[in-house]
Amino acid sequence: MPKGPQGQKRPADTVQSAIMGARIAVGEVQEIAAPNVKTVRAAAGKKGGAARAVKLESGRRTEIAKKAAKTRWAKD
């Protein structure tokens, strides 16, 4: 299904798309904007990271954190 300028769902058929545009212009149909993709993905990543941290053992989390810190500070 094609998307509008802000990611709204639109009909694939040309005639249906024109009718939908006219209905939006007249005010018969209220267009609902799609959620911001970056915001949705960021929230999902935070949930996944927390869930992974709970499942990992303490020693493994420490190893991962040390490796990340070493890599971060080695970039200079």
Image (cartoon, rainbow, N blue to C red):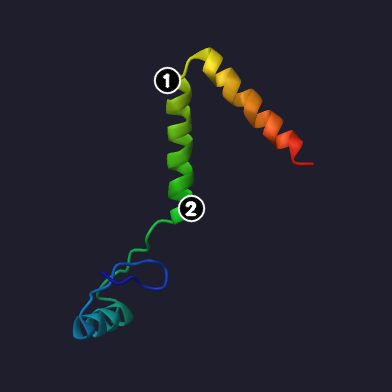
Dot in front, 2 or 1: 1
Q: Residues within 10 Å of mark 2 (few under 14, many from 20)?
A: few
Q: Which residue is mark 1?
A: 55
In the foreground, 55 or 42: 55
Q: Secondary structure at mark 1?
A: helix
Q: Which residue is mark 2?
A: 38
In the foreground, 36 or 55: 55
Which residue: 37% across, 63% down?
Answer: 33
Q: Is residue 51 left or right of residue 3?
A: right
In the displayed structure, 17 sits above or below 29; it is: below
Q: Secondary structure at mark 2?
A: helix
Image x and y of residue 61, in percent: 55, 20
Q: Residue 46, which numbered label?
A: none
Image x and y of residue 37, in percent: 44, 55
In the displayed structure, 62 sits above or below 21; it is: above
Which residue: 30% across, 72% down?
Answer: 2
Where, quadrant-wise, is the N terminus in this rendering? bottom left
Image x and y of residue 39, in percent: 48, 50
Where, quadrant-wise, is the C terminus in this rendering? top right
Q: Amino acid at mark 1?
A: Lys
In the displayed structure, 64 sits above or below 12; it is: above
Quadrant of res 4: bottom left
Q: Earlier in the sequence, mark 2 or mark 1?
A: 2
Which residue: 59% across, 20% down?
Answer: 63
Q: Amino acid at mark 2?
A: Lys
